[in-house]
Amino acid sequence: MSPSGPLAPNGPSLLHNPVLNRGSAFSTEDRGRLGLEGFLPPVADTLETQVARIHLQLSILDNDLQKYLLLSDLQARNETLFYAVLMSDPAVFMPLVYTPTVGEACQKYDHVLRATRGMYLPITLKGRLKEVLSRWPQRDVRFIVVTDGERILGLGDLGVNGMGIPVGKLALYTVCAGVPPEMTLPITLDVGTNNGTLLDDPLYLGLRQERVRGDEYDAFIAEFVAAVTELFPLCCLQWEDFANINAVPILERYRDRICTYNDDIQGTAAVAVAGIYGALKLSGERFTDQTFLFLGGGSAATGIAELISQAMVLEGATIEEARARNWLFDVNGLMVNTRTDIAGFQKPFAHEHAPISSFVDAIEAIRPTGIIGVSTVPKLFNQAVIEAMAGINARPIIFPYSNPTSRSECTAEEAYKWSNGRAIFASGSPFPPVEFGGRRFVPGQGNNVYIFPAMGMAVLATQSSRVTEDMFIVAAKAVAEQVTPDDLALGLIYPPQRDIRKASLHVAARIAELIFDKGLARVPRPADIAVHINSLAYTPRYPAI
């Protein structure tokens, strides 16, 4: 846990408080005043020199997991330096603290754990959640990212090892959009795990029982929501990596009652729609003329399909016409309305058609302009799939969005090669630039990082009482409008990640405008929303002591 309230200065104890610790950057004067003489090397550092030292330490490590662990240790001992390092080159460090490296970190979390962060709330605490949550030292919590660990990225049930996801996401709230870190709280709800490997692992740190389901689970979630809203009334609750069977009902149950959203459903949808807006800048086609075929039929797929449909409605289509242009394909084939295994949330996208069991055959029959992979199964966008898309589209949209990289439906190189350089490509995890046909392509990463930090800053700046669907469409448009002609020339349909802070604050301002327009804000509208947001954004500086 990272204490958020300043402690009374007490000599060397300051070196163990990650919020107040400056490490070697304590000045000579401060060392005398604070009783730190003798506890540090004699020459005082600057924050810039400390950042350079961390860069050096990272450069000599062999692999990304080791770099992740070094950064985690840094966060646990010196929070200001941690954020200064990440903000020094976001494009380099985001893949280390989040996707794809966080996937491996979560798989090995109980083996590599050093210091804990956030709060773990097992179902054995049922009836006492408010009491335990009230122990968190920071009273003004504005953002909670919570998981129950059942569907971590594309890796499945990792139980409490999934804590790496809330920790990483909240770090990006700060890095990308300047949400003050003391206002964030990562939480894992432990209701057991059905992962037999974890249950048999003597180092596993979660409850050794199968997952609780049904009414008992729902009651636990309800108690948690009630405790959060009572203790932290201005808090926005972000649900993360819940299995479909829980993610969809939880969102439906609470979205109109509290300030909440599900990033896997809504954030993923927004970044996909942003990618489509960007892709259409390249193809020159109309949004309402697009047809999409999804590989995967879970909540991520239906969330994207529904937001695409809502965006098409804004362009003049009826909702029925828009939904008819979104098709789902899962392990049992094309989702048609005669199938008996269609869940309620999938029904709007189960259309009248003959059954089709081959994805390539579905492409030939549906003739989509874009395919979107949210299957978590690698390599399913094979050569036959890409060639089929290139055969019916001058500029086929190819979005393998499954995370981490090991789960991607295809690589950037495969998409460009098999489409003869005509694919409009974006993936969920990063891929390096591709040289093909005398051209250099820079693959876009359809990473939710373009959406959720900006949503957080907009909610912070407005104290919004709700997060609504149209906020995600506004966010998608705001992301796409920052893509320049130079970006498009490289095939890049998202703003470069090196500019993520600037991009996020722009998106946050657009969302905040909508929040004020809809009357959802709980603060007066400022004269200049962008200036107001920038004034709130965190910058890593050592606090006064």
Image: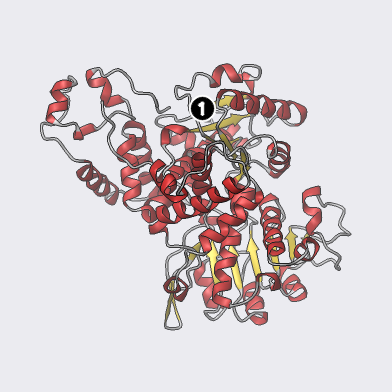
In the displayed structure image, the side of residue 353 where residue 450 appears, left or right: left
- Neighbourhood count class around disc 1 (C-alpha, 10 Å): few under 14, some 14–19, many 20 upward: some
Residue at numbered disc 1: 119
Q: Position of residue 436 (x, y in %)?
A: 45, 79
Q: Is residue 154 visible?
A: no
Q: Which three-letter amino acid code belongs to the residue tagged 1?
A: Met
Q: Position of residue 428 (x, y in %)?
A: 54, 58
Q: Is residue 461 visible?
A: yes
At horizontal 65% and vertical 67% (from top left) the residue drawn is: 371
At horizontal 67% and vertical 29% (from top left) the residue drawn is: 221
At horizontal 54% and vertical 81% (from top left) the residue drawn is: 420
Toward the viewer: 434 or 493? 493
Toward the viewer: 312 or 335? 312
At horizontal 63% and vertical 46% (from top left) the residue drawn is: 518
Q: Position of residue 332 (x, y in %)?
A: 78, 58
Q: Element type at marker 1?
A: strand
Q: Is residue 413 above or below residue 182?
A: below
Q: Position of residue 14 (x, y in %)?
A: 27, 23
Tell me how the rendering is colored: secondary structure
| Number of residue marks | 1
In the displayed structure image, the side of residue 316 where residue 261 appears, left or right: left
The quadrant the N terminus occupies is top left
The quadrant the C terminus occupies is top left
Residue 194 in which image quadrant: top right
Toward the viewer: 442 or 151? 442
Q: Is residue 525 above or below residue 288?
A: above
